[in-house]
Image (cartoon, rainbow, N blue to C red):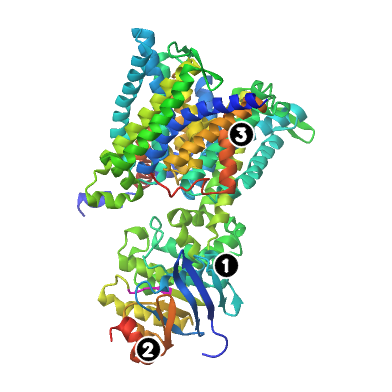
Amino acid sequence: MSPNDLSLSAPRRDLRLLFGVALAAAACLAPLFLGTYALHAIIIALIFLLPAHGLNLLVGYTGLLSLAQAAFFGIGAYTSGLMAVHFGTPFYLNFLAAGLLAGAVALPLGIPALRLRATSFVMCTLGFVVIGQAIAKNWIGLTRGDMGLSGIPKPYFALGPASFTISGTTSFYYMVLVIAVIGTLAAYLIVRSAAGRNMVAIRENETLAESVGIPTWRYKLVVFMISAAFAGLGGSIYAHYLTVVSPLTFQMYYSTTMLIIVLGGGAGTISGVVFGSLLFVGLSEALRVAPEVRMIAYGLSLLALVFWFPKGFAPLIDRFWLFLGERK
Amino acid sequence: MTGLPILEISGLHKSYGAVRAVDDVSLHVNRGEICGLIGPNGSGKSTFFDCASGLTRPHAGTVKLDGQDITGWSLNRIAREGRMLRSFQKTVVFGALDVEENLVIAGQMFTFPGLWSTFGIGAMARARVEALRERAREFIKIAGLWDVRHQPAGKLSGGQQKLIQFASMLMPEPKLILLDEPMAGINPKLIERVVESIRFANTKFGVSFLVIEHNIDVVTDICERIVVLDQGRKLAEGTPDEIVRNQAVREAYLGG
Amino acid sequence: MLSAILEQIVNGIVSGSVYAIVAVGMTMIFGVLRAINFAHGEYYMLGTFGAWFAIEYFDLPYPVAIAIGVIATAVIAVVVGKFVMQRIVGAPPETGVLATLGIALVLQNTVILVFGGGYKFFSGGYIEPVSIFGFTLAEQRVLIIIVCILVFVGLELMVTYSRMGKAMRAVSQNIECCAVVGIDVPQVALRTFILGACLAALSGVLTAPVNVSVYGGMGEIITFKTLPVIIMGGLGNVRGTFFAAMILGIAESLVATYVGLQFRDTVGFATLLLVLMWRPHGLFSAQARF
């Protein structure tokens, strides 16, 4: 036996499990070694993760570009805020109501919108955001207009006789972390299902998908609603975190941010969206740069993504994952 | 070849503006038959297919599949409920997905009872997909695509993509397949292969075929009956021998 | 009562003229590049800022400032056109949406970063009132209407008779054939884009004396109002865009007066959504190119 044979027979350890455990540990222990501001940045990143997953299902998997996420985000935020302020309901009720209402509103909006060609559809989704803001500003009886809702109570949970309130940043972080993990898992399961495969088929070639029996229009509508629900859920957490909701929640800025997360992280992949959220939102929050600088960075990122990195960070993430699995 | 025809089309009309692409065409395909549809370019064959398969709506006429009136049904409904599938002239596949995924998708809507069931994550859903995968692998082996089965379909050659397309149409156990110029762009050496596949599907799975084709040798070889279209109207109908000897057909299409 | 309504309609025609000049540029850009220019309003803003800067820092007279505003925008448009817009030709529609969104973010925020986010006061312009057909209007408003008419007549002539105009029509109708026939498509695309951006800038400079306040974020609202106009006018349809712009201007004016000022800015998108739901292909034919 030559010396080379020894290297061939050495065991190959799969580092992926180790990486996963390390990541989970880091996530759980983050509040111990991160300052409040950094923690805040991660919380924002995790809040945006849910709407981003929704947008990913729409853009990355089904191939439908939409700017409407901000509209459903806003609907979720207002729903949750209004319920908390007027009814004092526990958080999980507000949370679910936000998601359900956002998803429900997406139905009558999606039906006519999805008949449109790609360009008009994008315009229409932008219109939802603009009209949403107008409604929030002018339906003063419900939304208090430009003054917005303030003093949204901290999220509290009531289970039978016991109840507890999420009061500090640390506990909020853990709450959002749990929700984000569940949300990511849900997105993953959808993507791995037969429906997820059908969505990709629609993206790749809609007519061919139709010809093998896939009801493409109905799928698009369903995905539009699911995407809206995800956005609404994100909005709910946002409302409780900021404790304020205003018509400014209906802004292109949110749709654009979610687009950058999805496209930058890697449209059509789940890990890419998670990475994108932490990178674009978490990083830009943590860097405390002037909002204008952040927006310029967003703009340049969009240009870079469109022309040079159409798959975002996804190829890098894939290579990293393969690298972990192959090492001995 | 007894009983109701598997496909019965009467009085089909489709105009584009002033142009009558399909003008009062009626034809039928018998159960288990391979029927040919020929005619010069612009005679309305593709438009006829588009109307029959649900890609476009005809202005008039009825389409009956296995006794059921499917006039006006959408493309996906005819495929899913009617089990009549069609190919496209330009070979298309789901480019970013591998061969096995292409075939699994082709079969999904036929095993899953409805849209919502496709979101299922339970054992039932997994079992359905597993059954589809097995069936897909069978076809992959028969088609000789085993070695490339994990490659993205978009990266394969035209001939391989055609095989994928053909296998896709067999995944759902269809009653009838509309083939739109299956020999177009095929290397002459592979023509025999495609002919064999059609015969195989016809005899082993009992699939009926309606084939648009320009290659007359192939048409007369595999088709039991031929319908000739010219300028949107049916010119003639009969066995290959009858058609080849038909004077009007020769003038319009076969070149005397 | 009637004269009050007529007065609002005249106001509407003024704003309609503003929208028309901006929108025609955006619709031509769409016709040639097949891209919705989400950054279009930013060129309106840049023109305004250029003129404001000339007046504030160099004390130049208003007519000179107009030229400076347009030229400054043209320079920026050349850079953006060469590096970004030309690459959009032939790309899928998502490319145009995302790229122009990116440009909008960069332009808008660079201006805010450099000049600060506050409102600036635009001094200059012909704000003396003048009486025409019994209506009293600021001279500037009359100027806007006149320029609008000149622009559209000029465009009509250019598109019908000039070589550039014919090339633009050709590219918007059948881009594949153009390269074969020897038309330099990227060059046509670049020139159309610069023309469109300059028109937007011109509109901005002309409107500045009327709106008086200048700020970095003013372009976004213009983009949001122009989008419905070009869709309802028919993408690429110059004449349809003119009418759609006028209708929007008048509708906004009437809504502001008789329904409520707070609803004025929503009229555009609200109408667009209604139209899209009811007639998915727009009000005017999108087939009629220019």
Horizontally, is A16 left or right of A114 in the view? Answer: left
Quarter residue C71 falls in: top left
Marked residue chain, label 2: B
User: Which numbered circle lies on residue B243?
Assistant: 2
Give the Cα distance between marks 3 and 1: 37 Å
**Vertical relation: A8 (above or below) B127:** above
User: Which numbered circle lies on residue B73?
Assistant: 1
Q: Residue at x 80, y 33 (%)?
A: A161
User: Are labels 3 and 1 on one chain?
Assistant: no
**Reading the chain from its start, which is encountered first: label 1 or label 2?**
1
User: Are labels 3 and 2 on one chain?
Assistant: no
Pointer 3 and pointer 1: residues touching (CB < 8 Å)? no
User: Which numbered circle lies on residue C56?
Assistant: none
Question: Which residue occupies the extreme right position in the image?
Answer: A161
> Quick one: quadrant of the C terminus of chain B?
bottom left
Indicate the position of residue A94 as horizontal and vertical percent values.
70, 35
Residue C164 appears in the rendering: yes
Give the Cα distance between marks 3 and 2: 66 Å
Give the Cα distance between marks 1 and 2: 32 Å
Q: Mark 1: which amino acid?
A: Trp
Q: Mark 2: which amino acid?
A: Ile
Judge the density around disc 2: few (<14), some (14-19), many (≥20) Cα neighbours within 10 Å. many
Residue range (magenta)? B179-183
Q: Nearer the viewer, mark 3 or mark 2?
A: 2
Name the element at disc 3. Answer: helix
User: Along the line of sight, which residue is nearer the eye, A207 or A323?
Assistant: A207
Indicate the position of residue B193 as horizontal and vertical percent values.
32, 78
Magenta stretch holds residue B182: yes
User: Are labels 1 and 2 on one chain?
Assistant: yes
